[in-house]
Amino acid sequence: MRFLTLAALGALMSIAPQADAADADALAAKVDAKVLAWRRDLHQHPELGNRETRTAKLVADHLRKLGLQPKTGVAHTGVTALLKGGKPGPRIALRADMDALPVTERNALPFASKTTATFRGETVGVMHACGHDAHTAILMGVAEALVAMKAELPGEVLFVFQPAEEGPPDGERGGAPLMLEQGLFADSKPDAVFGLHVFSTLNAGQIGLRAGPTMAASDRFELTVKGRQTHGSRPWSGVDPIVATAQIIDNAQTIVSRQMDISKQPVVLTFGAVKGGVRHNIIPDQVQTIGTIRTFDEGMRQDVFARLKNLAEHVAAAHGATVDAKIPLETEGNPVTVNDPALAARMRPSLEKIAGAQNVVDMPLVMGSEDFSYYARQAPGLFFFVGATPQGQDASKAPSNHSPEFFLDESALKLGTRAMLQVALDYLHGGAAAK
């Protein structure tokens, strides 16, 4: 049984060996400069999901230099490596994501991205607008620090450098589901899995933590409204899919605002792109829209699917059009990310040792999603947040993750490295007794 009473958990935490915060700080200090350099290099050379070839090579080369034997090509471009400590103990997994986003950077940094790529048939800018460059650099530093103390390390650490967290390209598979399908935990499931995310809604120096459901489930949808093409001056001669699509988008907002019981759990329904037509005076045959649905409750999730499909079909029919509604798309959506409550309680003191108790804040529900959720379904998981917005700036108004102006205060690299090290060391030293 992995469930502990609060009394038993408190007793366990009082007797389990703990690494001193000074140990994590000393280990991290030796890699800080490298972590900073790696992050800037990765930021300047971002790669989209399933295309992280340069990033994967940088990671794999580093792990080899550490004396590890990395596996490459996992889920296309993923890299993993297992560190076996010199003493018996539990196994943990530490995960970082490597992919960037189709976003054109608007930060005036000397290492700003100038990279472009093709995404959904269009040339787009590519940017680490979500901070995965920081995650990769931090885990590279953590790996070096842990290898340096291999002889004294109890247990094993599986380093997971994952591609395509933001989702694979259309028609492809990838990310956490594919890594697991290809045997990531086949040899031995970890006793715990840890991940972190730099986050704009927290200031530098802060760590965000929440037990239980933490990040929303996410599902993509696609609606293709089919009308009949005609000249723009004679709309009565055809069926206008643009007007029908506009009304679907407008009316769909009432699904959340008027039809869902959001006092139970929050729901978000967002249209992210609309594409149709090529000329000012031609009404096209069809219009395609894509979007995302975010939920925390499975019943509400299925309800939103049904309501959006029903609405789209009836609005389209009222215009004499039809709709091909793929709700959800035939791809893996992310489940709810759930932090194991016992693990969160146990590791909170580790985070407080690094950041200070006053700087470890309780996170609200996050409507963003994470495919870390797949790992946390296989083993107790803990996913925490590291502040990215400079101190003195209102983090609630800072450009968000996924913004072309997303900005990382690089002190987050030092805090993230130390936090992940402390969590890993404390769990390894005390994990055998907790199993």
Image (cartoon, helix red, strand yellow):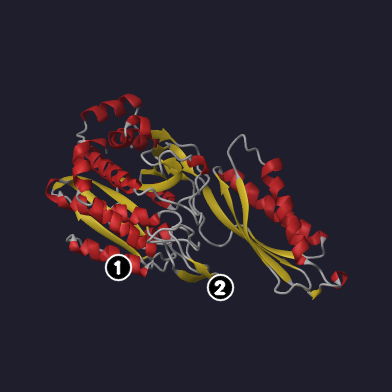
Q: Rounded to the nearest whole Å, what is the CA distance between mark 2 and mark 1?
A: 27 Å
Label 2 residue SS:
loop
Instruction: Name the quadrant containing residue 122.
Output: bottom right
Q: Position of residue 97 (x, y in %)?
A: 38, 56
On screen, residue 59 above or below 427:
below
Q: Quadrant of the N terminus?
A: top left
Q: Nearer the viewer, residue 306 or 76?
A: 76
Residue at the extreme top: 7
Residue sitting at 20 percent across and 64 percent down? 64
Residue 121, numbered label: 2
Q: Is residue 123 left or right of residue 22?
A: right
Q: Quadrant of the C terminus?
A: top left
Q: Position of residue 410 (x, y in %)?
A: 35, 49
Q: Is residue 152 left or right of residue 297?
A: left
Residue at numbered disc 1: 57
Residue sitting at 69 percent across and 55 percent down? 309
Q: Position of residue 206 (x, y in %)?
A: 38, 38
Type of residue at label 2? Answer: Gly
Q: Position of residue 178 (x, y in %)?
A: 41, 62
Residue sitting at 44 percent across and 51 percent down? 407
Number of marks in picture: 2
Instruction: Name the quadrant containing residue 381.
Output: top left
